[in-house]
Amino acid sequence: MQHDGEAEARGRNFTLHLDKALPCPIDKAVWNPEKDLLAMVTKDQQLIMHRFNWQRLWAVSPEVRVTSLCWRPDGKALAVGHEDGTISLHDVENGNIIRQTVTHHCPVECLAWVEEKEMAQTAADDLFVYEDRTPRFFPPPPKSPAMPGAAPAFDISGAVGSMEDPNSPMDAKTALKASHQQINILCSGDRNGTICLNIFGVFLIGRVDVSELDISTCKHEKDATKDSSYRLHDPFILKVSLSENLHHLSVLCTGKLVSSHFEERKTNQEAAYGVFSLKINTALIGCRSKELHQVALQVSSIEELLEVLQVSMNVMQKVWSDAHTSFREKFKGLSQLLREHGSHANPQEECLSLLSCGLASSGLHQFLAVSLGEGGLKRLSKTMDAALRELHVVIAEHLQPVAEILAFRVGELRGISRWKARLRSIGLDEKLVDQAMENSGMVLIQIERLLRVIADKVAQYRMFFIWLTKTLRQLNNENSPSNDQLPAINSEAVAIFLKTQFEHDILGPHLASVTNDTVWIDMNLGDKETLEELALMGGFVNSEFLHNSLNQQISQLFLSCQHAFSMPSKVVSQQLHFEDILFLRHLHQPNVLNLYVPVSLACYEDKEKLVSGEVCRYVCFQIPEKTSEECMFIVITREYWKKPSAPTENTYREAIALSIGAGLSCIDLSLYKEKQLVLLGQTVSCAQAWLMIMPIDKLPYKNITGVFPFDGPDLLNVCLSEVRYLIAPSWRAISMMFLSDYFFGMGDLQGAVFSISLNDGRARILPYADVVPPLAVSASRGLACVFGAQRRVLLYDLEEDEDVEDTEMD
């Protein structure tokens, strides 16, 4: 196919660093943007991390199937989309889950994480400067306590070595917060056409349902008619990308474009089903990025603190439930012994009788002396004492400090919400934040009450067990000197314990989980007066909340925060609207679940046009599949639009169709840095596989907006017809009755088809012919990873060639 000299030259392109066997085929792969790390998902659903030298760092097996991968811009966290709509953030060091969110209701098909590029500050921006004052008044918030009986997770990074400074004390969540200095947004698209925008990957700030977008063909609303609006049915998101200025969201998706009034017409129209490129206006996010950044900082911290509160409550409930169950089980044997000895009294009455007259029945005597014994009594006493002390430690070291920091942060958020001129436009409602602030204060009072309850319980249980110990020794006629070392017995306190707490769990309702059955906490007169005084001092109108359990109060705090934090997403989502659409390729197979569509999307700053403030977006896709009747094309569209700071707004689009040389087919593709395209392909006979990189910025693009009799790129009828004629004039026309009046010849654009071969770029013939997607390319590190069907992996350096020194010497 080529001369020997050309083939030999190709053999030196791209240095081969690695050729290894794989234990399992790879389903997805993505390079870390900052480090030589490759995250992969195998066909058997293992999430693994490899170094450049193919050393495995860690491997985890997610419970739910992984459907997408994406790195945070700083490379310190990996976003993983799952089949159930969950997105989990994994620590790069060990694969542990840092945070987990559920923003979708179906499989997450694509992820893209972008960080806002620093722009020149204006005078208005300088006014909105907020300093996080929490570190001034509080130490770092404590972590969640460990669940009793749970073994600590094994950190595999300790076995293979850390990728960061080993002397650094920064943990995963601290590293996560360190990335919050600049606003970054995780974009996710799912199988049902929903796109979610999450600041820092955790705070939902915008949601777009592509099927609900009104796609207008008229540039001006006054020109719009009933027939000029369309909807995209059954959308399936393939790729998403947010511009670095956060003003434009680019979406590649499949779907069926029909008239919005299709249902009213009741006509059998054939709609256009295929791949579409959408541009959604997200200017509100870009213009209000500073305000959203500050709100997201507080909200993400508050949500993390709420998580610590809930985990702390779960730990306390577990600790007390285990201890109290042991106590109940021990004294359950006393009831059976009393019945065996013919007594109809219950254990509480027997104990009160022993306290009042000092005489024990035969059943109670046998239980204390034989069944329980002094050793068993000591063990039970230590169990209850240790549990109550553990509850106190969890409250003092976790629950109370976190609740105080949370109340302060909600107060800071309330202060921000009062700047209505800047914050109302993004939906931060002062009244809703006020409600969250009041609930956080109620939680603090409930925690203070729980501390009092636990302190009383400690004293009462200790007095009860001291009394039982002395009684047992007297029943056994033991007058050892150690009896004098025991504290004096308060008979009144023991009697109160036996009447109120021996058979009733007073502490349990305070820690009970929130269920449909409302827990009503009774209070004695003294506690009620004290707590009501605290409530009045805190500014609460009434003290009815004191009858709730602490878990109920935390649940109310969670709901009020959730309501307040969801408003920005609702307000911002309503202002994200359709801006432009382009029909990319027709699909003969409506079901895309098992169809791999090679597409790539990237945005570049145009260095030659920085003066005019233009940004260039490239979209590259393959069309259609190779058949005997049709040619294979790689279509590239590029679109320029001015930045918001530009004096005028102007958008124009160009396109070119690359016809791959005879005997070649494309397997996968990826846009590369500096406007280059990486292609992975095979010969038609599958005898050889090849890898090629070629520049695409100097290709003879054709303008596909200015040649039409309609003004503007947002004319849907133009977009639907232009690419069909551009790519293949002989392609079967798509019959669309509602657009038939606009179809016209595109002869001027037929010259946009440009033939390419392996001579048009740097290419290399690969040692294995059975290459398969995905093609993993690292633009920041200049690496390409190619996978073979026979479980092989090839790692190439795209920036260096083999035998360069020898060639220069020759």
Image (cartoon, rainbow, N blue to C red):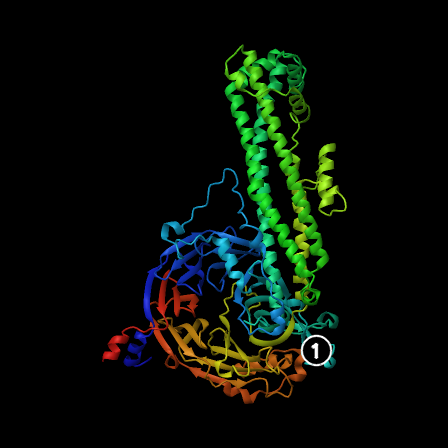
**The residue positioned farthest toward the right in the image shown:** 541
Q: Quadrant of the C terminus?
A: bottom left
Q: In the rendered view, does 519 fall on the left or right side of 2?
A: right
Q: Camera-side residue: 122 or 385?
A: 122
Q: In the rendered view, does 56 fall on the left or right side of 113?
A: left
Residue identifier under label 1: 228
Q: Quadrant of residue 211?
A: bottom right
Identify the residue at horizontal 62%, vertical 19% (top origin): 335
How many neighbours does mark 1 have within 10 angstroms: few (below 14), some (14-19), or many (20 or more)?
many
Q: Is residue 204 visible?
A: no
Q: Is residue 515 visible?
A: yes
Q: Position of residue 608 (x, y in %)?
A: 48, 83
Q: Position of residue 277 (x, y in %)?
A: 57, 74
Amino acid type at mark 1: Ser
Q: Position of residue 734 (x, y in %)?
A: 61, 78
Q: Quadrant of the N terminus?
A: bottom left
Q: Camera-side residue: 656 or 442?
A: 442
State whether residue 539 is above or below residue 714: above
Q: Position of residue 99 (x, y in %)?
A: 54, 54
> Helix, strand, or loop for circle 1?
loop
